[in-house]
Structure formats: C-alpha cells, structure tokens
Amino acid sequence: MSIQYKTIKELTLMLKAKEISNKELIQETFDLIESNSHLNAFVTLNKENALNKAKAIDNKASDLSLSGIPIAQKDLFVTKNLRTTCGSNMLSNFIPPYSATVIENLENAGCISVGKTNMDEFAMGSSNETSFYGNVQNPWGENLVPGGSSGGSAAAVAAGIVPAATGTDTGGSIRQPASLCGITGIKPTYGRISRWGMIAFASSLDQAGPMARTAEDCAIMMNEMCSHDLKDTTSLNKEIPDFTKNLNTPIKGLKIGIVKEFDLSTLDNEVVKIFEESKKHYESLGVEFVEVSLPNINLSVPTYYVVAPAECSSNLSRFDGVKFGKRCKNPKDLEDLYIRSRSEGFGEEVKRRILIGSYVLSAGFYDAYYKKAQQVRRLIKNDFDNAFSKVDLIMTPTTRGSAFEAGSMNDPIQMYLEDLFTVPANLAGLPGISIPSGYVDNKPLGVQLIGNSLQESQLLNVAHCFQTSSDWHLRTPSSEIR
Amino acid sequence: MSWETVIGLEVHVQLSTNTKLFSGASTTFGAEPNTNVDLIDLGLPGVLPVANREAFHKAIRFGLATNAEINQVSMFDRKNYFYPDLPKGYQITQMEKPIVGKGSIMINVDGVEKLINITRAHLEEDAGKSIHDLFDGETGVDLNRAGTPLLEIVSEPEIASAKEAVAYFKAIHQLVTFLDICDGNMAQGSMRCDVNVSIKKEADDVLGTRAEIKNINSFKFIERAINFEVTRQIKILEKGKTVVQETRLYDSVNNETRSMRSKEAANDYRYFPEPDLLPVVISDKELEDIRNTLPELPKQKEIRFIAEHKLEESEAKILASSKAMANLFEDATSKTKDSNLIAKWLVGDVSALLNKDNISIEESKLSSDNFATLIERISDKTISGKIAKSVLEDIWDSGKDVDDIIKDKGLVQIQDESILENVAKKIIENNPDQVEAYKGGKEKLFGFFVGQVMKETQGKANPQSVNEILKKLLA
C-alpha cells in the first residue's frame, strides 16, 4: 500500500494498525523523494537520522501525536547539526549549533524531519526562482513554478512525498504556494509560533505555519508548532487551544466579509468564476456574505515593500563574512571582505531588497518612507478591526491567478503585485488560510480566509467544513482522485 | 572679547548585572576570549534578544537619584553599522524612547556647587573588542564584552571647563557606585566617556562647531584632552579659520587629540525601532519598589553624619564622598565610641595615605575591623597618637593586625609614672645648661625636655603624663 498522498491522520492509523512499520514509512518517503528528485524540492536530506529515529520508534512504541510522521522542514528553520542554507549561497556551509523552537516542538511530538526544503533565497520571492539551489518544479506541471517562498515545502506536500511540511509566511509565503500547488496552508496570528531559530527576513511580519493536504492535518500540526516561548518576546502569552477540537462545528449563520476595495474584474474570468463558486459553496453551508470596506487595503503592497525590505536590510547585516557563512577568498582589507563576501553570497533579489531597505531607512528618507509605511500599517490594522466588528471572517482569492511558467515573470514589480491578497494579513498580524478551491487548465487555485486575531480554530473549522463537503483538496497531480 | 568653552559629556556606565543585556551569558571581566558568549551574543541566524529586567532596574535607580523622568514605556531601536566586533551588524540601543528622561546632578568645583542638567540616559549593548596587535596581519575579535549592558548618560552642553567636566564625571562615578549599579572600575573600562567640546565668543548665543573626543576612561585624561582641544580650537578661531565638525581621538602618550573621521565620512546609522523586542513597560509598583530601596546618597549621608556625630561640614563631606569611606566611618563608629577621633583620622592620615598612593579604600590593605581597633587603642591609651601614625603606616604596607603590630614592636604606651619620672630625672640631670636656661625664662625649652623623654622611651611615653612630671620636676 503506497504511502503517497496520505494524510497525517491516515499515516498515524496505518502505523497504529501496524500496516506499515515506522522504518518502512520513512524508507518509502525517501524513495518518493528520490523518484521526485526532478522537483528539486529538497536542499538537504536527513536520511540517516530519520531512519534511526524510525527504527527507535519501531523498537519502543510511542503515543506522541506525530509519532513517526515524516515532515519536511523549510530550510529557513535552523536545525542542529543539519545544514541550513535559507536558499542562499551565503549559508551553503552553515551547520547550526542549535534548533529552532518549531523544530524542537515538532520533533518532541514524535515527528521525523526527513530533510530541508528548497525556498526563495532568505524567503524573498514568490516563485522559488531566487533560490541559489535552483528552481523548484510545481508537481502540477513541468515548467510551472510552485510559488514561494515556501516552494519546496509546497511541492513536497503536493507531490504526496510527505503529508505535511513547515513553511514561513512574511507576505504570503505559505498561502501563495499552497494556492499554486493545490494544498492547504495556514499563517497563524503573529506571535502564535515562536520565531526563535527562524532565520529572520522581516521580524515584524515573519510567522511560521504548517502546510498540509487538509485543514485537519494543519490543525494537528498547529497543536504542536504553537507555544509561548520565553526566548521570543514577541511570542504571545495566550492560551493555545486544541485546534482539532472545534473541527466539524456547524458554520450555519456565519458571516463572511467580501472586500469592497478589491477589484476582481482585473483578474481572469476563470479565477473570478472559481471565487464565486467558493462563495456559493459556503452559502450552501449556511454562510452569509457581507460586503466590508477596508479603505486602505490597496496601500498594502507599497507599505509591505517598504517595511519588509527595511527590516531585511538590517536583519541580513550579520552575514558579513566575519563569523559564519560565506567569506570571500583573499580579502585585501576589511572593506573588501565585506563587499565581496556579501556580493558573492547574496543573489540579485536579496541585494535589491537590501538596497531598497537601506534607502527607506536612511537619514532624510526615514520619515517619508519607513515612518509613513508604519502609519499606513496601523490604518490597515484599524480597517480590519472595524470589519471584524461586522463579520466573522474575510474571504479573498489567495492569488491573482494559478501557477505561472518559470522565467515568465521578469519584472520585479509585477512579481511584488502577486502578493496583493496575502500581504494585508501579515501587515495586520492576522491569521490567514489558503485552501484548494478549483482548477484553471488543470492548475490548482486557492481561496483565502482571513480571521480575527487568535481565531485560528475558527479559521481551520471553516476550511475543514469546506473540505468535508468538496473534493478539490483530494485531487492529485497524477490525476487520480484519492 | 574672551572665548567661552562649552562642553557636553556622554558617559557610558557599564551596569553591574550578572548577565548581558539581551542574553544569559555572564558579564565577568577578564575571562578567556570568547568564553562569555552565547548564541545571541554571536548574532547567529535565527536568534532573538530578550531584555534583561535587572538592567532596567539599575537604570531606573540612576534616574530616580537624579530626579529624572522615568519613561515607564521605553523602546529599543537598532543602530546599523558594520564592524567585526558588532556581530549582528547593528547595535540595540534606545533612540526615541529612553528609559530615563531629563534629570540633573550637582557638581562641586573648588567648593562651588553647580547643577548640571542631564538630557537623558538610555540603555544599550556594548560591542566586543577588536584586537589588532596580537596576530600578524590579522585582527582578532573577542566578543566577551559584546552585549554587556551600558547606561549612556548624556549631559546638556552646560559644562564650562575641563575642571567642571572632571567634577561632573566624578559626580556620576560617585553616584553610580553609591547606587550599586556599576563597579566604577575605570581601569577595566566600567566607565568611559565621549566629550563634545566647542568654543564660542562670550556674547554669542549660538554654539560653536563641536568636536567629539571619543572613549576617554580616566579623570586625568578627560582634563588633559579637553585642555588640549580648547587650546587647539581657540588657535584655529583666532586665525580666523573655522573648526571642523569631526570625531577625534585622545592620544595620552603624546597628550593630543587627533582627527578620526569627519562629519561627511560619518555613518548613516539608519535607526529604526527594534522589531524583535516589545516596548518595555515598568509598572507603578515596580517603580515604587525601586524608589523604596534606593540607598542613602552622599548628600543625605553628609547631613546625617553632621546631625548624629556633630562633625564639621568639611569632615562630613569627605566621609560621605565615597561609599567605602562612609562604610569605614560607620563600621568604626559602631565598634568604638569616639566618632570625632574616627573622623579626624579618616579625614587626616587615612585620606593623606590614599592621596599619596592614589588608590581607593577598597584597593588599600586597611580593613574596617583593623581601623576600628586602631582607634580603640588610641582611645584606651594603649598607644599614643604618634605611635598610631606609624602603626597605620605599617598596616598600609603589610595589612597586619593592629594588636600584633603593637605587641611585636613593643609599642605599648608607658603609663607607669615612676618609670617616666626616672627617665625625666635622668634627662634633667644630663642637661644642666638647658635646665638653667629654662628656669631663667626660656620657656620654649620645655618642648626640648618632652622630646628627650619621648626619644628615650622610643615614643612610647604617655605624652600627658610626661608633661605633668616634667612640669613638677622643673618647677
């Protein structure tokens, strides 16, 4: 019995029923990684450790919630003694001496990290094309991008190699690739999941989250990933519910907002059609749709592309060739060491953002850009607060369209505009989920639900209710419905 | 028209917390290079800072003691620049909302008091150290100091001379050691300062262009650096030229300041709020608790000493000048009654020895127990004041116990009047000329006889008894 395309829930049952041993499960996972190596979803594998851990569980049964479950980890989380590149040449030789809290939480729950997934360099990109380790292929089509920046994680889940993977989302890096690869991905409320050990892109926006085949599996992952971590002062000291507990709660009477200011007429007819069908589906479940106004929402992308580069320009200063990471050969002097190490270590997109960020923070420009952007950010957050006094959730398309071809989007500005629907949730620190909602020319497309602060349980339930009454999430690239 | 000097000081005080400002690493001085360093201090990818509450409490103590505004919500900012001993490529500091706002401190120059306003005091992390002279053609980096909490105290430009600047620095030094927020160890760099100096014509309202002299860590060098800089700037101005705004370095070997970098070459630090740290909120209760545990400050001590021990103001001021001196005084008064005698010795002989060696009481070999015993032996007439002086000097060199010194050297005062009378008689017998002259009206010669008796008894004679006996015999 193949393990491909199985969910966490299904694999757990198979392991418990001893239909498969832990070692067999992990061995088969590595076989799948091998047979899907053309996807280039993984940068570094953790085969020996993974097999050893599986054998250990075979020898001594465990009832941990994720016992024996193979998980792929985005290569942005540091993993003790396992190379962590963040998709960059800068860290091609970096073996961390410690593990991220997310990694520890998941491994303490029994999961087996099978490897580190490919990603846009330092999470900066929407197509996985900025990775130093090459493009990731979308399992749904040879030349299609998987989205980004968590492209490797999305591809690994979509190809059915692993039931779930970790991702991070600064402006849509979980939800956008989830949409483009036909899987489910949730970005929790800012602060729900510790950032300790996440290589920072934009500290005030970065948030980790799970990517899986179903909302239910995302809930199972969330139960283990979330924690109040004293090592991260922005980590929330709020009660962490059992995210699986409220699944299947009826959603009749729920109010979902549709954003007045998003002009969907600029999107392809097919994309609009899918979005309207999702609405109808929810209406059939008793949901009421209400128009809400988010007057400043169209300032999200420019705001985001000031705040995120500003923080990244500072966060990436530590990569200077002095202590860890790449150092240029034979530096003439200190300045030469800095300039060449950074010029050789960083790719083009990262350099572009460091330049933008340094500019918007520089003396004389700070007030006009960074400070202004933070003020707009506050307005956007207020808009959401107002909207959530009227509705329970907000629904938008996740992306402007389905997966595009690699190399087809050469204008960075055009690429940035891809983030239109996803960045508002990051700017406002709100949870957002993308679930498969249809197909355009056999390419998956997601719909996004944004919840109020800390309302992940509700978000997961609303997504789960969609999935228990539809089959979009069950389709696979090998065109068989599971 | 004469020139006027305008000085502002930025004093960096290393706070004596057990751990660093944002990590759990130790702050102990003198450890092997790169051993007091954890993941956070290294700035490894993925690490996050956690603010040290103790550092805030210490900063607040300073604020309360200088009657300053305390910002109960304060924030951190990043100051971005590249340097090998700055692991993250930015320093976490407080730019917009420092923990301590406007305050003031009293300084004293040659007996004249002047209030200096303090603009602000903010918390920031120290950098590591670059070591250029140990490795051929390479630079070593020691990150032990990286992340150590500093309180940067910024004065208003109200200091008018090198002497005032030194007095201000001393006042800060005195205060932070009294408050127990800094060990005050200048040699280990626990206190350093940057000095901003400018010159203007007396009648001018606008300040002149300033030069900033970086990183001076001794009272002596502050004075010399300022004096050099003032002379340099006046010379430039008198030639009709203008002073360049720049950062300068004081070279103590050649006693001069030298240009480090000009304003044009200065970094753009691209300050922005530190997104990894939430604003730090100090509750009313926390603030009250700190206020209630503030120690007695020098001025309060001085007033109390005068009231409790009936000391002269000048004596009380010296006794309250440092925590160690005040402790020595109070320890001794708790063990032996005669507080005036204690004060006299501390202000006199002990202070003289300290000045001579240019050390602090902590650095001397004089313990408070030993000092109290010394005073007791004077009070109970075991030794004379003159002998006590030599005992004190002995302690100063050897640190030995007072009673051991008295015993070993046989310094116990001779009280037995019959012995003293015999000595006196012998002296009188041997000096008939002087006796005749004395009796003939040369009364000054009395001192000669006293001296001779003391000499004969190796100073051990009770001077009062000797006086009485000689008066009787020579009458």
Image (cartoon, coloured by chain):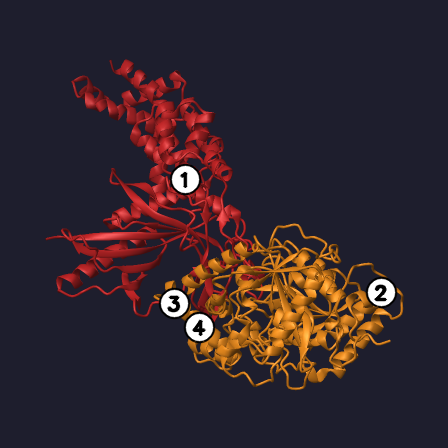
Kind of residue indicated by mark 3? Ser
The CA distance from mark 3 to mark 1 is 35 Å
Question: Which of label 1 and label 2 is nearer to you?
Answer: 2
The CA distance from mark 2 to mark 3 is 56 Å
Q: Are circles 3 and 1 on residues that touch, CB within 8 Å?
A: no
Q: Residue A362, which numbered label?
A: 3
Q: Can you give x and y, in whole percent of width and height, for residue A305 in the image? A: 48, 70
- At mark 1, the secondary structure is helix
- The residue tagged 4 is A356
Discs 1 and 2 share one subunit: no
Quarter of the image with the C terminus of chain B is top left
Kind of residue indicated by mark 4? Ile
Kind of residue indicated by mark 1? Leu
Residue at the spot 41% in from the left edge and 39% down from the top edge: B64
Residue at the spot 25% in from the left edge and 37% down from the top edge: B111
Q: Chain B is drawn in which colour?
A: red
Residue at the spot 56% in from the left edge and 73% down from the top edge: A122
Q: Quadrant of residue A257?
A: bottom right
Image-based side of A59 in relation to B9, left or right? right
Q: Are circles 1 and 4 on residues that touch, CB within 8 Å?
A: no
- Decide: few, some or many residues near mark 2? Use Cα within 10 Å; few <14, some 14-19, many ≥20: few
Decide which of tag 2 and tag 4 comes sooner along the chain: 2
Q: Can you give x and y, in whole percent of width and height, for residue A402 in the image? A: 62, 78
Q: Are circles 2 and 4 on residues that touch, CB within 8 Å?
A: no
Discs 3 and 1 share one subunit: no
The CA distance from mark 1 to mark 2 is 64 Å
Q: Residue A13, which numbered label?
A: 2
- Decide: few, some or many residues near mark 4? Use Cα within 10 Å; few <14, some 14-19, many ≥20: some
Could one spot residue B24 in this view of the protein? no
- At mark 2, the secondary structure is helix
